[in-house]
Image (spheres, rainbow, N blue to C red):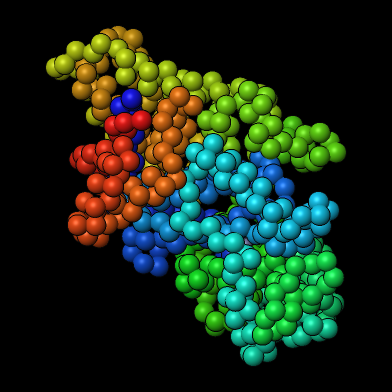
Amino acid sequence: MTTEIIRLTTPSHIFHNRLLMIRLFNTLSGKVEGFESLIPGEIRIYTCGPTVYDFPHIGNMRAYVFEDLLKRFLRFMNYRVTHVMNITDVDDKTIRGANAQRVSLHDYTQQFIDAFFEDIRILNILPADFYPRATEHIPEMVKIIKALLEKGYAYERAGSVYFSIDKFPKYGRLSKIDLQERKIGARVDVDEYEKESVHDFALWKNHKEGEPFWETEIGKGRPGWHIECSAMSAKYLGQPFDIHCGGVDNIFPHHENEIAQSEASSGKKFVNYWLHCHHLVVDGEKMSKSLGNFFTLQDLLQKKIDAPTLRFLLLSTHYRKMLNFTLDAVEQSRAALQRLKDFVYELENRPFQEGAGADVDKLIEEARKNFIEGLSDDLNISTALAAIFELVRKANILLGQDKLAAGDARTLLGLIHDFDAVLGVLRSDKEPDLSPEIQKKIEERENARREKKYALADKIRKELLDMGILLEDTKEGVRWKITKK
Ligand SMILES: [Zn+2]
């Protein structure tokens, strides 16, 4: 039995400066912009998920950790976030892999889907609200392709359907490609291609021997890669929605094509803010299996690099900068995290006296302000981390002088847990791990409370209690305790 308490949400954190605006770099405009959600207090996010043809590598994980940081920060700022991440379980690569192993596409992809969920659990990435799979959304894709055909944005050749980029004048705006280079009328069937070869791209691919297929109104075949994100984002988030994330690799052609499909078919704007995470390199070089510097999360865990250290490392470089993964960087992350853990340990275990102590309010206000201002500035993680470590440094001096009272320790601990609601690095392997099912229930209850549906909130609270999770509503937000194992 354990009574570990973790603070989940902290309404009181929207400190004195309610006018503080979150600013984000929008790839579409090429500028840092003030962020405004379409619906006040609510944010809808779509992030491109894994293509499940192989185990995810740490470059993929970097993007997922960045998206998790963004999502946790927006929640910390009291937004209700709805997050959709797709799973690409049919495309050129998955089909090739399944055929090579002589197993069904479903069996082939399932092993990598399981591995993906295990990895994000280990890295303490909050689950998305929806994980739609491409193979389960073929009718939705066909509907968009039909609309594109009817409106003249798409055409059929030899049983396949292509998007005509000349018909969509905005094509190229996101990636700033040079459309002069294109060969008019040239087409491409492959799912991924380089900027240098701008082409009409496949929305639907005619059936080929040895490939999975669906019988549909637009013929027998299978979707191109890009159409799934247009179809599934519209289904779960509507159009337009607030934020679309991915890696810089996704900008062209994938996201460019998503915009073309969604906006041409619906006549509406697709997405307001596009955020892209930069590459991860290992010792300054691009990861590749042939160079022997290609790592999955499991590879690194086997090298005795623990998950919180990895998570800290992955989020501590600003998302728009190249992240250089080196053993030195691992050691630095480990040391920084240890400093934070030692601080928490001291606050939790020293026999502090009740009564008047040092005045830590000013320290706390300053740290909170700098942390929030840093992350509000296009997720400036360096500023946010500096705020935390400056607080640790100053509080450690007070600790060394025995100047802290029990109340101070509690307040400091509360603040560190608030910060960790965003960073997600303090959970050690020994600490309890809430299953995605329980996390989701806690979130549902929070939402019910926010919407003043108290009967529903109470019902979920009881269900959680039966599962051994006791929720406590405090002034600072909701905390949970495990009451039984
Ligand atoms: Zn996508």
Q: Position of residue 24 (x, y in %)?
A: 49, 54
Q: Quadrant of residue 321?
A: top right
Q: Residue at x 69, y 37 (%)?
A: 296
Q: Is residue 222 left or right of residue 429?
A: right
Vertical position of residue 308 compared to residue 275: above or below: above
Q: Is residue 56 left or right of residue 427?
A: right
Q: Is residue 435 left or right of residue 208?
A: left
**Quadrant where the C terminus lies?**
top left
Q: Quadrant of ligand 1?
A: bottom right
Vertical position of residue 37 compared to residue 164: above or below: above
Q: Nearer the viewer, residue 81 or 303?
A: 303
Q: Residue at x 25, y 47 (%)?
A: 461
Asked whether the viewer can see residue 20, the reply is no
**Quadrant where the N terminus lies?**
top left
Residue that sits furthest to the top in the current view: 401
Q: Residue at x 57, y 64 (%)?
A: 29
Q: Residue at x 24, y 52 (%)?
A: 459
Q: Is residue 273 left or right of residue 445?
A: right
Q: Quadrant of residue 301?
A: top right
